[in-house]
Amino acid sequence: MRREELAANLLAVQSALAEAIAKSGRSQDSVRLMAVSKTHPYEAMLALCEEGQLLFGENRVQEGEGKLPPKGERPLSVNLIGHLQGNKAKKAIALFDRIDSVDSLRLARRLNDLVSVPYPILLELNTSGEAAKHGFESEDALFFALDEIATMENLRVEGLLTLGPLGGDERAIRTSFAALRRSFERARERFDLPSFFELSMGMSGDWPLAIAEGSTCVRIGTLLFGAREAP
Ligand SMILES: *Cc1c(COP(=O)(O)O)cnc(C)c1O
């Protein structure tokens, strides 16, 4: 996609987002836009970066390794938002600024063992009950894991992530986002999590509902970069 087109898409998303945030009575700085750049080249990310977009999301370690300069040698932040296999944990830590898709106690233990300075993560909760999705399968499973994760010295749990039901109707999507928000609030009461602020929810097809339900980070791919080719 051409630069001008990317810039125009960014402007359109930014202004729709600003309007939705205002409508929900929230402050503009309470929601960040993450540009989901999977399948798109680093040049396209840089083009958006030059327009002021600094936060990106990738869903595969291997793809990220192939296209991203190392952390510290790029002008933009990139978080991992896709499922991470334990055997790629070390590479993921080296490459990504935050891992937003930690979905098991085992993976958290592994990450905690691999880092020494507190490393930021989000925990992914499956709020739609869809078996194909990753993420902790229930709030109970999440809280059971948090009992231990909240005490890990080398991990900083910054919040939660979920995916709305695919092709769900508006009510099902809202229910799923509202469930994440409630789990977020209960987790904050129950655990000692000093930097717990992020509710990552909302994608190209459902982001307005996520804003209405309290999202602090919407993950937008298609609306910025256009449709992805089938994998
Ligand atoms: C691909 C992806 C997105 C962005 O999806 P779009 O519908 O293209 O906006 C958001 N979150 C996750 C976890 C993804 O894998």
Image (cartoon, rainbow, N blue to C red):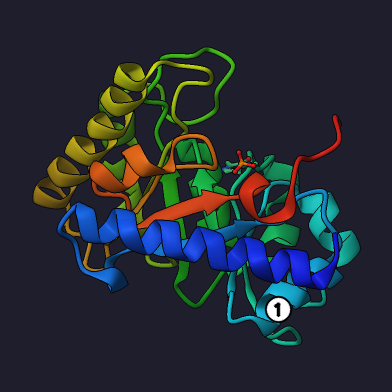
Q: Name the quarter showing ligand 1.
A: top right
- The answer to which of 171 and 195 lies nearer the viewer is 171
- Using residue 1 as the reference point, say whether residue 13 is left or right of it: left
- The answer to which of 77 and 32 lies nearer the viewer is 32
Q: Is residue 126 above or below residue 89?
A: above
The kind of residue tagged 1 is: Lys
**Residue at the image point whose x is 40% and y is 16% from the top:** 169
Question: In the picture, residue 78 is in which quadrant?
Answer: bottom right
Location of the C terminus (image quadrant):
top right
Residue carrying label 1: 71
Location of the N terminus (image quadrant):
bottom right
Q: Can residue 117 be seen by looking at this rendering? A: yes
Q: Is residue 168 above or below residue 196?
A: above
- The answer to which of 93 and 73 lies nearer the viewer is 73
- Provide residue 20's location: percent of width, then percent of height: 31, 53
**Residue at the image point whose x is 80% and y is 59% from the top:** 64
- Provide residue 124's location: percent of width, then percent of height: 44, 39
- The answer to which of 31 and 123 lies nearer the viewer is 31
Labels in figure, total: 1
The residue at the far left in this view is: 189
Q: Is residue 189 above or below residue 228?
A: below
- Using residue 198 as the reference point, say whether residue 79 is left or right of it: right
